[in-house]
Image (cartoon, grey):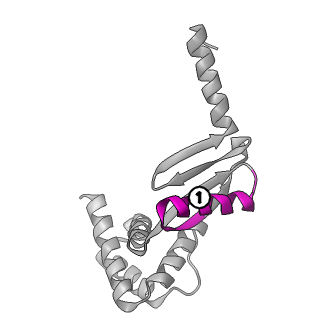
Amino acid sequence: MNTGAITKRYARALLLYTQENGSGDRVFAQVRRMLRDSSVPARLDPDLERFIALLVQRGRVDYLRRILRCFMDLYAESAGLKNVRLITAVPDVGLEDRIRASIEKHSGCRVLIETEVDPALIGGFRVIVNGEMLDASVRHQLSLLHRDFIDKNNRIV
C-alpha cells in the first residue's frame, strides 16, 4: 500500500473538512502544538476528534502523525504561510524576529517559526524553509574547514 497516497488523501480530506466548517485555524494550531509537544491535549477540537475517530474506524491510526504533518503543509500552503524551523546554539529572540522579517519581506508570505536550541551547533544557526536549509553554524563552518584542509593536503586527518 502506498503510504504517501494514503497520507495525502486523508490530509486533503481534513483540510477540506476544516475549511468547510471554518475551523481550519483552530485545528491547525492544535495540530501544530500536538506535533511539537508529542502529546495529546485533554480536549481536542471537535472536528479533529471526529477525524481521528474516522482514522480509528478505518484502521489508519498508524498514519496519524504523517497525515497531520501533511495537513500542516497543505494548510500552510492554502493560507499563504511558510513553515520555518530555526535551530540556534543558544536562545535568541532578536534573531528570530530578524529572520521572520527577512523571509516575510522576500517571500511575501506570513511566517510561522518553530525554534529549537541545539548546543552542538557551537554558535550560529540553521534555518529550514520548505525543506531547504541555510546552515550558518560554527559547527558547519568547522566541518567545511576540515574538509578543505584534507582536500588541499591530500591526506587523512
Please tell me which residue lies in front, 85 or 33.
85
Query: Which amino acid, by three-letter code, is at mark 1?
Result: Ser
| Residue positioned most to the top | 154
110 in the magenta segment: yes
| Residue positioned most to the left | 1
Please tell me which residue lies in front, 89 or 67.
89
Q: Does any portion of residue 59 appear in the rendered image?
A: no
Residue under the image location 55 percent in, 45 percent down: 134
Q: Is residue 143 above or below residue 98?
A: above
User: Residue 89 in the image: x percent, y percent?
Assistant: 72, 48
Helix, strand or loop: magenta stretch? helix
Q: Is residue 67 above or below residue 27?
A: above
Residue under the image location 39 percent in, 66 percent down: 70
Residue under the image location 56 percent in, 8 percent down: 154
Residue under the image location 50 percent in, 63 percent down: 83
Q: Is residue 137 above or below residue 112?
A: above
142 in the magenta segment: no
Task: Return the residue at label 1.
Answer: 102
Q: Is residue 121 above or below residue 152?
A: below
Left or right: 86 in relation to 17: right
Please tell me which residue lies in front, 26 or 46.
26
Q: Quadrant of residue 52?
A: bottom left
Q: Does any portion of residue 157 appear in the rendered image?
A: yes
Q: Which stretch did the figure color magenta? A: 90-113
User: Residue 3 in the image: x percent, y percent?
Assistant: 30, 59
